[in-house]
Image (cartoon, grey):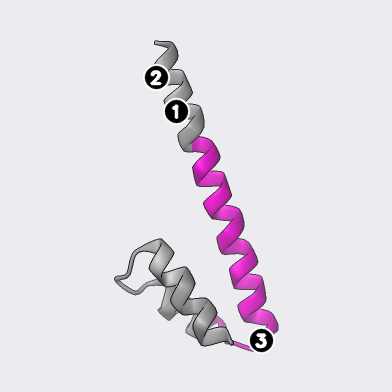
């Protein structure tokens, strides 16, 4: 049972870290002047989260 608890806690921590990264990324996109629709449409794409972040940052530059 201890292994399961550890695995769940690790998953929660990882999820929280990703959430923080996305919030910071969206704040940066807003600062750069991207509209809510541009941000929303991009985030709804079919790419993996990591690839989306990299492409999104590239687009923001």
Q: Residues within 10 Å of mark 2 (few under 14, many from 20)?
A: few
Q: Which image quadrant is residue 26 in?
A: bottom right
- CA distance for labels 3 and 2: 42 Å
Q: In which quarter of the image is the N terminus?
A: top left
* Chain-order first, disc 3 or disc 1: 1
Stretch of the chain drawn in magenta: 12-37
Q: Residues within 10 Å of mark 3 (few under 14, many from 20)?
A: few
Which residue is the site of mark 2? 4
For the residues labelled 3 and 1, say whether their Cβ atoms are less than 8 Å apart.
Answer: no
Residue 47 shown left or right of residue 20 in the figure: left
Q: Which of 28 and 3 is in front in this view?
A: 3
Q: Callout 2: helix, strand or loop?
A: helix
Residue at the farthest right position: 31
Q: Residue 8 carries which label?
A: 1
Q: Residues within 10 Å of mark 1 (few under 14, many from 20)?
A: few
Question: How far across and how far down the image is residue 39, in percent?
Answer: 51, 79
Marks 3 and 1, how far apart at CA = 36 Å
In the image, farthest residue toward the top: 1
Q: Is mark 3 on a helix, strand or loop?
A: loop
Above or below residue 46? Residue 6 is: above
Q: In this view, does 49 lie above or below 29?
A: above
- Determine the CA span between mark 2 and mark 1: 6 Å
- Left or right: residue 17 compared with residue 6: right
Q: Do the residues labelled 2 and 1 touch (CB within 8 Å)?
A: yes
Please give the residue where the numbered disc 3 appears in the rendered image. 32
């Amino acid at each position: 049972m201890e292994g399961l608890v550890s695995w769940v806690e690790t998953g929660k921590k990882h999820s929280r870290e990703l959430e923080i990264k996305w919030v910071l990324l969206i704040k940066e996109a807003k600062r750069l002047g991207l509209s809510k629709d541009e941000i929303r449409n991009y985030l709804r794409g079919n790419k993996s989260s990591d690839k989306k972040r990299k492409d999104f940052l590239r687009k923001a530059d």
